[in-house]
Image (spheres, rainbow, N blue to C red):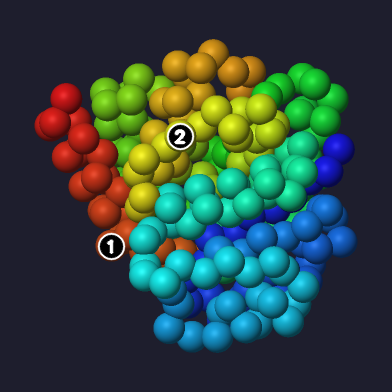
Amino acid sequence: MKVWLVIAAYNEARFISEVVKVVRPRVAGVIVVDDCSEDETAKLASEAGAVVLAHIINRGQGAALRTGTEAAIERGADVIVHFDGDGQFLAEEIARVVEPICKDEADVVLGSRFLDKASNLPWSKKYLLHPVARLLNRSVWGINFSDPQCGFRAFSVEVARSLKWRQDRMAHASEILALLTVGKWRVKEVPVTVIYHDYGQGLLGGFKIIKELFIKYLSR
């Protein structure tokens, strides 16, 4: 199966070159969607061997992943992997994430930071942000996965074609899971390692996710 990897990147010049270099040998191709970065993210990703697509305005992670997913489908991908460009995920775990799809045991595989103890989750994320986000996800979207905000995931091309998420920014992850639940696809969770640099997106990013979910809850 042809596995294509999609990275949504915004101001990731610090990490993107190394990320692309370590994932390239493990997949058929890498697409980096530069979401109007103010640094050399696009240039460095291209030099490292990625197909680089660029948004002319900053549209958000959800929009960038949608652009990359559509491009991977057009390039003949059988499996599409979403992966972060900041060095938090491990390239060697790509095989673990795509294996259930390649073996026809699942249509979608979701990485989870909560199925083992390998991820060095900051206290604020583990005991504050993620519990609140999981509660809102159950209330808003009716989903009950162990780690609904993890960005390491894989889809069969059939699922990828069917997903039409509309959230352009951080709440896209929850919307994707809601669409998967409605579509009754076979979903499997597998443990993944996350290595945080400077607390990842930090408290501010976490509260933005919760804010988006809470707004959605109030608008039901």
Quarter holding residue 110: top right
Which of 161 and 185 lies nearest the eye of the viewer?
A: 161
Few, some or many residues within 10 Å of mark 2 (<14, 14–19, 20+): few
Can you say whether 212 is above or below 99 in the image? below
Which of 169 and 111 lies nearest the eye of the viewer?
A: 169
Left or right of 190, for residue 100? right
Which of 128 and 137 lies nearest the eye of the viewer?
A: 137
Disc 2 to disc 1: CB gap under 8 Å: no
Few, some or many residues within 10 Å of mark 1 (<14, 14–19, 20+): few
Name the kind of residue labelled 2 in the image.
Answer: Lys
Which of 18 and 157 lies nearest the eye of the viewer?
A: 157
Q: Quadrant of the N terminus?
A: top right
**Which residue is rendered at x = 74% and y = 39% of the image?**
79
Can you say whether 54 is above or below 81 in the image? below
Q: According to the image, label 2 marks what residue?
A: 164
Quarter holding residue 40: bottom right
Percent coordinates x, y for residue 166 in the rendering = 36, 40
User: Which type of secondary structure does the marked residue at label 1 adopt?
Assistant: helix
**Which residue is rendered at x = 68% and y = 46% of the image?**
74
Percent coordinates x, y for residue 4 in the rendering = 74, 50
Asked if residue 194 shows in the view, the reply is: no
Can you say whether 24 is above or below 15 in the image? above
Q: Quadrant of the C terminus?
A: top left
**Which residue is rendered at x = 32% and y = 39% of the image?**
133
**Which residue is rendered at x = 48% and y = 57% of the image?**
64
Name the kind of residue labelled 1 in the image.
Answer: Leu
Q: According to the image, label 1 marks what residue?
A: 204
In this view, which residue lies farthest toward the top? 184
Q: Earlier in the sequence, mark 2 or mark 1?
A: 2
